[in-house]
Image (tube, helix red, strand yellow):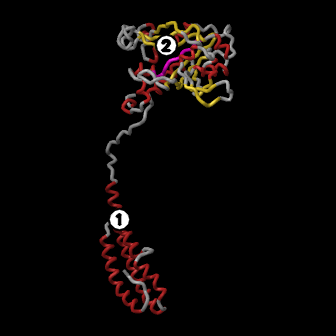
């Protein structure tokens, strides 16, 4: 390495070292295999802390006549090294460009690979299909909040406080309070509150469906989840009867499960109503559909009965109409509710509801 300048003797010694420095630099420049190595050599000799740069900075300590002589030779060496670096860099850049071109060469005649695209979740597919069918029959879609107060979730649906019917729903109550301290907040247990909110704002005749997520505080198993999806329907008009409900829901199942028109009164699209109790309807009934696996003949899927339970329904209770300021003497209607998860399980022959929420791509990619 070149020494700092301190005397004329040192200058003479350093000048003798110029030849050695140039030989070392030339050999290293020539041996550099890529631009990264060349840059490291440049910093070694001509960088801010390089050998030649350090020498040039030390010239200030010499008398004028000595500084002039040493400076001329040092600058001449610097220019020679700069020229050598530039020439080597040009060669390496050309080589690097050629290598990159060769490595990036692509045959444009090669057929492209199909990119894997995302797709809709099976529950989304079922919700969209069900919504489309009902819309074709004149129903509109109504939505509401998932956090409700107990008036919309229970009271307005003829389920007052301390009513035994509240035990049917395993409610998830929230600690936060609503603006009205007498109305506690909860995660809705069904989408029926949407019907109440809609009837408060709109005048009959009404024909709506309310799809959405609901929550229950219950154990998880193959047929139960803490959160799941429902689709509920409401029709309010003059002189609505059970016959109207049966015709509409039977047509829905025929289209949803893609049965041919002739099966509308045959196995597969056939439904039956069984008396049941729900506080917000009177009369109330359970709706069964002829088993899709055996066509109503009886099998293990339907416990040899030939029927599968699919929804709860009934004629809107007069007290529910009164809660939204409608006169039961002027208006009648029906309401129904079914699980979208249940529809998807039947449509795709899935035996465990938890598969919808597990996030297993092997399962989801089948749809």
Q: Nearer the viewer, residue 154 or 296?
A: 154
State left or right for residue 5 relative to residue 173.
Answer: left
Q: Is residue 176 magenta?
A: no
Disc 1 target residue = 94
295 in relation to 121, above or below: above
Residue 281: which disc? none
The residue carrying pointer 2 sits among few (fewer than 14), some (14 to 19) or many (20 or more) residues within 10 Å by Cα, namely: some
Residue at left 30%, top 75%? 27
Q: Residue 83 location, x and y as percent? A: 38, 76
State left or right for residue 187 relative to residue 30.
Answer: right
Residue at left 61%, top 19%? 154
Quarter holding residue 18: bottom left
Quarter holding residue 157: top right
Which mark's residue is nearer the viewer, 2 or 1? 2
Range drawn in magenta: 333-341
Residue at left 45%, top 31%? 120
Disc 2 target residue = 251
Quadrant where the image shows the N terminus = bottom left
Quadrant where the image shows the C terminus = top left
Residue at left 43%, top 79%? 54
State left or right for residue 279 relative to residue 91.
Answer: right
Q: Nearer the viewer, residue 354 or 240?
A: 354
């Amino acid at each position: 390495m070149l020494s700092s300048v301190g005397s004329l003797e040192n200058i003479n010694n350093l000048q003798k070292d110029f030849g050695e420095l140039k030989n070392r630099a030339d050999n290293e420049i020539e041996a550099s295999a890529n631009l990264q190595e060349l840059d490291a050599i440049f910093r070694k000799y001509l960088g801010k802390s390089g050998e030649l740069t350090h020498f040039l900075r030390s010239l200030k300590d010499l008398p004028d006549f000595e500084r002039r002589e040493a400076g001329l030779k040092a600058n001449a060496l610097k220019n020679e090294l700069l020229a050598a670096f530039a020439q080597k860099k040009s060669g390496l850049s050309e080589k690097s460009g050629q290598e990159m071109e060769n490595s990036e060469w692509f045959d444009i005649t090669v057929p492209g690979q199909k990119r894997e695209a995302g797709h809709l979740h099976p529950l989304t597919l079922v919700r969209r299909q069900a919504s489309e069918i009902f819309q074709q029959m004149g129903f509109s879609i109504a939505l509401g909040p998932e956090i409700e107060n107990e008036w919309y979730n229970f009271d307005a649906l003829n389920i007052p406080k301390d009513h035994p019917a509240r035990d049917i729903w395993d409610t998830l109550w929230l600690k936060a309070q609503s603006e009205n301290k007498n109305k506690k907040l909860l995660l809705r247990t069904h989408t029926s509150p949407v019907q109440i909110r809609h009837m408060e704002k709109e005048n009959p005749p009404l024909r709506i469906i309310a799809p959405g997520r609901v929550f229950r505080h219950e154990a998880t198993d193959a047929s139960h989840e803490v959160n799941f999806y429902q689709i509920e329907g409401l029709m309010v008009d003059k002189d609505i009867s059970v016959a109207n409900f049966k015709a509409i829901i039977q047509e829905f199942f025929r289209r949803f499960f893609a049965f041919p028109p002739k099966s509308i009164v045959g196995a597969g699209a056939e439904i039956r109503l069984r008396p049941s109790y729900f506080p917000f309807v009177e009369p109330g009934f359970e709706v069964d559909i002829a088993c899709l696996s055996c066509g109503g003949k009886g099998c293990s899927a339907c416990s040899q009965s030939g029927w599968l339970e699919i929804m709860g329904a009934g004629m809107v209770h007069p007290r529910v109409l009164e809660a939204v300021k409608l006169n039961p003497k002027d208006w009648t209607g029906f309401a129904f509710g079914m699980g979208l998860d249940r529809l998807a399980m039947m449509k795709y022959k899935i035996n465990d509801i938890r598969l919808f929420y597990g996030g297993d791509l092997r399962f989801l990619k089948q749809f």
